[in-house]
Amino acid sequence: SDLGTFIAGLPKAELHLHIEGSLEPELMFALAQRNGVAIPFASIDEVRAAYSFSRLQDFLDIYYQGANVLVTEADFHDLAAAYFARVAADGVVHAEIMFDPQTHTDRGIAFDTVIRGLLSAMEEAEAEHGITSRLIMSFLRHLDEESAFATLAMAEPWLDRIAAVGLDSSELGHPPEKFARVFAAARAKGLRLVAHAGEEGPPAYVEQALDLLGVDRLDHGNRSLEDPVLTARLAREGMTLTVCPLSNLKLCVVDDMADHPIDRMLAEGIRATVNSDDPAYFGGYVADNYVAAAEARGLSRQDLARLARNSFLGSFLDDAAVAAHL
Ligand code: ES4
Ligand code: ZN
């Protein structure tokens, strides 16, 4: 379509992408076979049929199962290489990709295996596709503070290759305050900070992410709009929100794409961006997310250009690189 062509032609950054969530069923099967790992699905169609969720936890249970096929450095390389090859066609020129070390280290995969595989694919992506990238190491919030500190310690030799730490997994019952000390430690090491907040959790969790973690960027943030004071604050402070429309629909954060708040966020003056979250599970890569939101909410080409511009403004690129993309 004309809209799809316009969107794919907009240079953009992707700021909210879980690399484990880019594991397509075809690669899941290939890696299961390569590594002799059992998966609870008989066919690729059966995998796709299992991707029906009524809340975040339904998805997370399947997502952690899928990640079991990732074993060797080559697996992590191939996973990330497939992501970069796919989003080159979406107009992505910069990607800040999250990975969840604990999902792997807790089943005996070395931290170094994971990061070496990802970094080699990132280097190739710059050479082959001209896509620059950064790594965000995300802590699983359903695990304890001690496990997050242990993960930060494993990252110590790699700190110059990691841009930021993040916070993901089951939000309800695991408020940001649980990780205030480990985020302070990460900041002291020179890392930037992001956290998922306000996806299923209340506006108070967003306030904690701002006030107790001191995040540089918020992942999701949808439920902030329930609080007019918080909404105004996000706009005033120029906080970037990494919004994920197809994820929001699949996880029932919105009942219908026609109800998606992306344009309301822009109208409130919030620096909103559009991202894919877990594209292999939620039915589309980043350009599909722009298209779905644009069709459902009647976004103009000016709105779409604003969203793409916001993706660079909200990135962890240095000022000169940001300016070069605007
Ligand atoms: C996630 Cl959509 C979402 N929310 C929280 N944690 C996650 N990990 C991967 N996708
Ligand atoms: Zn996410």
Image: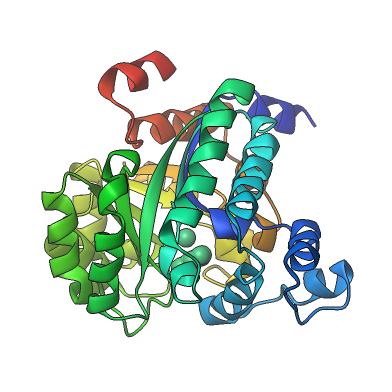
| Side (left or right) of 83 relative to 17 | right
Locate residue 168: give its quadrant: bottom left
Residue at the image position 30 percent from the left and 55 percent from the top: 155
| Camera-nearest residue between 249 and 311 | 311
Question: Is 304 positioned to the left or the right of 219 in the image?
Answer: right
Tell me if 32 is positioned left or right of 71 in this view. Answer: right
Quadrant assignment, res 142: bottom left
Q: Residue at x 87, y 78 (%)?
A: 42
Q: Nearer the viewer, residue 83 or 293?
A: 83
State whether residue 242 is above or below residue 147: above
- At 19% from the left edge and 52% from the top edge, which residue is drawn? 233
Q: Nearer the viewer, residue 255 or 130?
A: 130
Whether residue 102 is visible to the viewer of this picture, yes or no, is yes
Q: Position of residue 292 (x, y in %)?
A: 66, 48
Q: Is residue 20 above or below residue 149?
A: above
Counting from the top left corner in percent of width and height, residue 219 is at 38, 56
**In this rendering, does residue 258 appear at all?**
no
Which residue ends up furthest to the bottom in the rendered image? 173
User: Residue, x 71% and y 31% (percent of image)?
Assistant: 3
Q: Position of residue 169 (x, y in %)?
A: 43, 72
Give the percent coordinates (x, y) of residue 250. Answer: 63, 68
Task: Please state, as top left, top right, bottom left or bottom right, where the C terminus lies in the image.
Answer: top left
Residue 186's place in the image compared with 57, above or below, is above
